[in-house]
Amino acid sequence: MATSVSSTAGGTRRPGGGSRRTEILDAAAQLFARHGFHGVSMDDIGAAVGMTGPGLYRHFASKTAVLAEMLVRISEQLLAEGGARVVAAADAPAALDALLRGHIAFALGQPALITVHDRELGNVPETARRRIRRLQRLYVEEWVTVLAELFPHAAQARLRAAVHAAFGLLNSTPHSVGELPDAELAQLLHAMAHASLMSAAG
């Protein structure tokens, strides 16, 4: 979510598996994306996972806590996975390719989270919101560091602006998922984002 980890998530798919807590977060993401944070109750979230609303309080203290953990968790995951991809890559071009593929997989698989982030971040308590923003800045810097290896003479500000612009393109999936087969859309997003990042060289 970095620059804009955001949706229109009508036909969003639910990530599978995971713990009961993860199941609750997945269901809440779908509901928040579709109806808005204020349009969803704990009872609604409970019904989506086959629990009574009060039963959710064994997992989360409030609906706000659900939203905060949802956005903190995905920000942590993007940063951790992005860093791991960079470390595993043989060189800067391979690292950029790996970052693109990882973010595209996220954007195609969880467009509801993109929507919720863009629309509901203001409803997250300030402490959690600062943490989310910090994680997102670190994620952006993973990309900037790779681009700086590719374009050592480019200004950092220019590279950072290019990364934010590329995120805007990649995080457009809430509006496009379902229009094309996933593989074709992934290829299109990769080609367009890669081309936009290459223009950062100046």
Image (tube, rainbow, N blue to C red):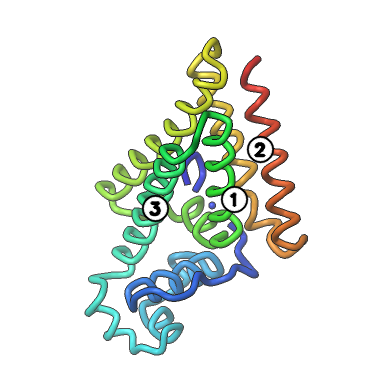
Residue 181, position as x, y percentages in the image: 75, 63
Depicted 161 relative to depicted 185: above or below: above
Question: Which mark sits nearer the N-terminus, 1 or 3?
Answer: 3
Q: Quadrant of residue 57?
A: bottom left
Q: Quadrant of residue 141?
A: top left
Crowding around mark 3 (Cα neighbors within 10 Å: few <14, some 14 to 19, many 20+) is some
Label 2 belongs to which residue?
193
CB contact under 8 Å: marks 2 and 1: yes
Q: Residue at x 71, y 57 (%)?
A: 176
Closest to the observer, 186 or 85: 85
Mark 2 → mark 1, Cα distance in angstroms:
10 Å
Question: Which mark sits nearer the N-terminus, 2 or 1?
Answer: 1
Depicted 58 relative to depicted 66: above or below: below
Crowding around mark 2 (Cα neighbors within 10 Å: few <14, some 14 to 19, many 20+) is many
Q: Label 2 amino acid? A: Ala
Closest to the observer, 34 or 188: 188
Q: Label 1 amino acid? A: Ile
Question: Which mark sits nearer the N-terminus, 3 or 2?
Answer: 3
Q: Label 3 amino acid? A: Gln
Closest to the observer, 139 or 36: 139
Q: Residue at x 43, y 81 (%)?
A: 44
Label 3 belongs to which residue?
77
Local secondary structure at mark 1: helix
Crowding around mark 1 (Cα neighbors within 10 Å: few <14, some 14 to 19, many 20+) is many
Residue 152, position as x, y percentages in the image: 52, 14
Residue 126 in the figure: left or right of residue 117: left
Q: Residue at x 66, y 35 (%)?
A: 194
Label 1 belongs to which residue?
104
Mark 3 → mark 2, Cα distance in angstroms:
21 Å
Closest to the observer, 114 or 80: 80
Q: Quadrant of residue 83?
A: top left
Depicted 13 relative to depicted 147: above or below: below
